[in-house]
Amino acid sequence: MKALGIEESKIRSAGGWMAEKASRLKLRVTDFGEPNLALLQSLEILSLGVIGKRQLWQTLKSAIGPAARAAGLDLARLDKRAAAQFDCVKEEAFKVAREIFATEIRSAGESRDG
C-alpha cells in the first residue's frame, strides 16, 4: 500500500481486529467438545482469507500491472505465494478433517456394537 501511495484505514484495521476477536470467541463456544472442530473451522476461515488475498493480487495485476511493477511490486510472485499458502492450509484442513471424522466413525461403530 505504501508503494502505491495508499494510506491504511484505521477504521478497517480496528474492524478487522474486532472481527478476529469475535470469531475466536465463536469458535471456542461452538466446538462441541471437539477441539479439532474449532481448528478445522479456523483453517477454513484462513483459506477464505488466502483466496481473497490471491484474488486481490490478480485483480491488481489486471488493473494496474505496469504501475505495480514500476512501484516495485511483484504481483505474480505474491499470487504464487498465496497459491502455495492456500495449498498448505488446505492440506492441514484435510488432515484435521480426517482425524475428526475417523474418530466420529469409530465412536459411532462402538456405540452401535455396544
Image (cartoon, rainbow, N blue to C red):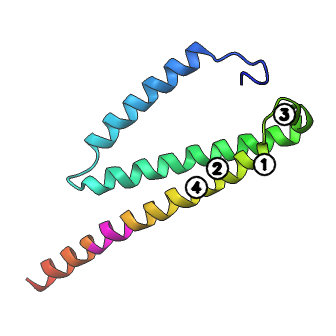
Q: Please, what is the dominant secondary structure of the magenta stretch?
A: helix
Q: Residues within 10 Å of mark 3 (few under 14, many from 20)?
A: some
Sequence-wise, the earlier of marks 4 and 3 is 3
Sequence-wise, the earlier of marks 1 and 3 is 3
Gap in angstroms between the C-alphas marked 4 and 1: 15 Å
Sequence-wise, the earlier of marks 1 and 2 is 1
Q: Identify the residue shown where x is 71% and y is 25%.
A: 1
Disc assigned to residue 68: 3
On screen, 70 above or below 113?
above
**Which residue, given by chain and number where applicable, does mark 4 sit on?**
86
Relative depth, front residue between 48 and 113? 48
Gap in angstroms between the C-alphas marked 3 and 2: 17 Å
In the rendered structure, which segment of residues is drawn in magenta? 97-102
On screen, 32 above or below 100?
above
Gap in angstroms between the C-alphas marked 1 and 2: 10 Å
> Any magenta on residue 107?
no
